[in-house]
Image: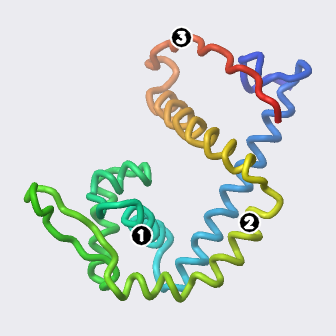
């Protein structure tokens, strides 16, 4: 069978079997995460992307000043145009409000309405149970490791998608990346 990756780190023991198993596990996890997200969303009568936007605004708002559209888009790794569409939908439903920044009138700040907060609070008992099951068996160290690794994988996936979109004939040759240092599992 042909190999699917050329980097030596992706061929432990001389085979890419482990990386293929990892890809399949990530695909299975992604499908299940989508289903969980869509389940939470359905409980609130929302599409999945709108629920993700609502919960992201809540998280960002809890970290300090209410987020703007740019901060929301960066947090969710979506375009500002898509963020705007989702926010407008949530605003029409009375779950999110937009207000002009007090100093910079060009900026719009986002916050949950009392109704938006109440809807999320109603769901919290189920969300706690589901997330406890979803992440059962993970230690604090596992969570920190995954929190460090997953953004790198997302950035790598963005680069891989850009390569696919450009087509192999037009894609710029990338310099080989240095192999990351091995860490204890």
Locate residue 156: give its quadrant: top right
Give the alpha-carbon distance from disc 3 to disc 2, as whole Å: 38 Å
Instruction: Give the labeled residue for mark 3.
Output: 175
Determine the CA span between mark 3 and mark 1: 40 Å
Neighbor class of circle 3 (other Cα within 10 Å; few <14, some 14-19, many 20+) is few
Residue 157: mark = none
For image coordinates 42% across by 52% down, the residue present is 75
Q: Nearer the viewer, mark 2 or mark 1?
A: 1
Q: Is residue 126 left or right of residue 102?
A: right
Q: Residue at x 72, y 17 (%)?
A: 6
* Residue positioned 50% across, 27% down in the render: 163
**For mark 1, what is the residue?**
58
Cβ atoms at labels 3 and 2 below 8 Å apart? no
Q: Quadrant of residue 4?
A: top right
Question: Which one is closest to the eye, mark 3 or mark 1?
Answer: 1
- Judged left or right of residue 154, residue 68 is left
SS for callout 2? helix
| Element under disc 1 | helix
**How is the rendered protein coloured?**
rainbow
21 shown above or below 178: below
Q: Which mark is residue 134?
A: 2
* Real-space Cα separation, disc 2 to disc 1, in angstroms: 21 Å
Q: Residues within 10 Å of mark 1 (few under 14, many from 20)?
A: many
Sequence-wise, which precedes: disc 2 or disc 1?
1
Residue drawn at the location 45% of the way across and 15% of the way down: 172
**Looking at the image, is mark 3 or mark 2 nearer the viewer?**
2
Tag 2–tag 1 contact (CB < 8 Å):
no
Residue 76 point in image, percent of width and height? 44, 54
Instruction: Return the disc, 3 or 1, that comes first in the chain's sequence.
Output: 1
Q: Is residue 171 above or below residue 41?
A: above
């Amino acid at each position: 069978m042909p190999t699917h990756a050329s980097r030596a780190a992706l061929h432990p023991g001389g085979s890419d079997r482990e990386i293929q198993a990892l890809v399949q596990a990530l695909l299975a996890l992604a499908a299940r995460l989508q289903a969980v997200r869509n389940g939470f969303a359905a409980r609130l009568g929302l599409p999945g992307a709108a629920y993700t936007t609502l919960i992201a605004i809540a998280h960002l708002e809890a970290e300090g000043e209410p987020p703007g559209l740019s901060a929301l888009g960066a947090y969710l790794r979506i375009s500002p145009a898509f963020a705007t569409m989702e926010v407008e939908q949530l605003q029409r439903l009375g779950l999110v409000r937009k207000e002009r920044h007090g100093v910079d009138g060009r900026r719009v700040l986002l916050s949950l309405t009392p109704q938006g907060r109440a809807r999320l609070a109603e769901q919290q008992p189920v969300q706690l149970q589901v997330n406890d099951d979803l992440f059962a068996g993970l230690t604090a160290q596992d969570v920190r490791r995954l929190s460090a690794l997953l953004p790198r994988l997302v950035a790598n996936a963005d680069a891989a998608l850009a390569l696919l979109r450009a087509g192999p004939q037009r894609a710029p040759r990338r310099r080989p990346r240095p192999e990351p240092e091995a860490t204890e599992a």
